[in-house]
Image: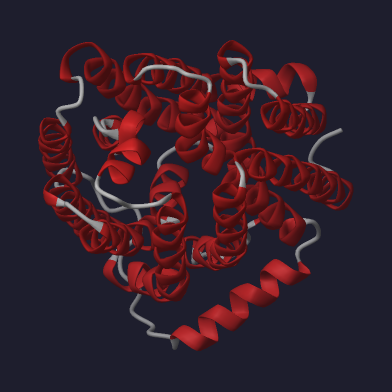
Amino acid sequence: MQKKNIGLMYALSFLQGMVFYASVATLYRQSVGVSLFEITVIESASLALSLMLEVPWGVWAERMGYRRTMCVCSALFFVSKVVFWRADGFGMFLLERLLLAVVISGLSGVDESVLYASCEEKDMQRVFGRYSALGTAGLMLASLICSVWLGKNYRLMGLLTVLSYGAAVVCTLFLSEVKPPEREKRQVGAQFRAHLREMLHTPGLLLLVLCSAVFLESAHTVTVFLNQVQYARCGWSTSAISAAYVLGTLLGLCSAASDRVCARLGTGRTGRALLLGSALSCGLLAVTRSGWLSLGCILLLCLAQALYGPLAGAMENRLVISRERATALSVHALLQDSVAIGVNLVLGRAADAGLPLAFILCGVMCLAALALFSGALRRTGQGG
């Protein structure tokens, strides 16, 4: 059962990574009159809904079982891609992100819990890394197809994404349950308070959760939204932008090597180097108009995200002591979403005022994440 579940989760990650329009999503939204600030408003609305649903979804997942939760969320994921395929303005794009919020809050903690329950603890970071890498591989393949064959055919990109997500739904039907539904039905509020106390009293856990929220949202904003505008600012064509996106996506495969890098350098040194390098990259993006230098900085940010994700995921899961793992991780995600909403709105407003200002703020946030990470290491003793 364990190997079958891990294989199906790997296939799910690959298929849901195949978002064919990802490399031009910002430019597409702009082409129908959606501004950068409106894009960040949509993202923030999505995060706000995720925030409200995080803990209830975690509790429901414990009651329904992880397999059924994965099936429901994958089906809603499929519906959200159908909406994006047909979207032609702000309202439809907002609806798609709201559906996505329901999905993300539902899957939050559940996919990691399925993987955690299906592997040995010594293999956890490697399994998490491969899971992330396969999602990246799917995205890379889709971006490559977009760059070479699809051009600006946005509707076809959307349709191909719908087909991939439909196949992902089928994969979830064959998962085996790793945690039967809870018979005891505790109140959502009681579970939230219990897991919040656990997070606050576990040494270093709160700092680690805050670090991940600040860094990953800042890096995500640069590598998914602002990168396309920066390349266009440097005079690059749509084809060149798509090719750059493929390169960035390719680096996401390095998440599979996160455990080996940490084993060689140490968790602490690896994390600090990634966060400091990200801060320097954002600083350079703020002052350069060189397309090639911009590409190098953005690729470094992609690499940092890829290596940091499994590292932080493994650290966080080791600190969770509750049997209700999905609910505990949902409480962590609730805090992360709360922080991410603020980060997203600040960076969106800054980008509308001027792209260099947004990059400077991203650099400051990476430095703040570095301070939080160092504090978490001192309290947990998980790495030097």
Residue 11 location in percent, x, y?
A: 26, 31
Residue drawn 38% across the image and 83% down it? 184
Residue drawn 37% across the image and 40% down it? 26
Residue drawn 45% across the image and 49% down it? 36
Residue drawn 89% across the image and 47% down it? 378
Using the image as rendered, state which of residue 59 and residue 139 is in the foreground: 139
Asked where in the image residue 75 lies, by quadrant, the reply is bottom left
In the image, residue 71 above or below residue 280: below
Asked where in the image residue 243 lies, by quadrant, the reply is top left
Q: Is residue 38 visible?
A: yes
Q: Is residue 9 visible?
A: no
Asked where in the image residue 64 lies, by quadrant, the reply is bottom left
Using the image as rendered, state which of residue 65 and residue 245 is in the foreground: 245
Residue 81 location in percent, x, y?
A: 19, 48
In the image, residue 128 above or below residue 353: above
Quadrant into which the N terminus falls: top left
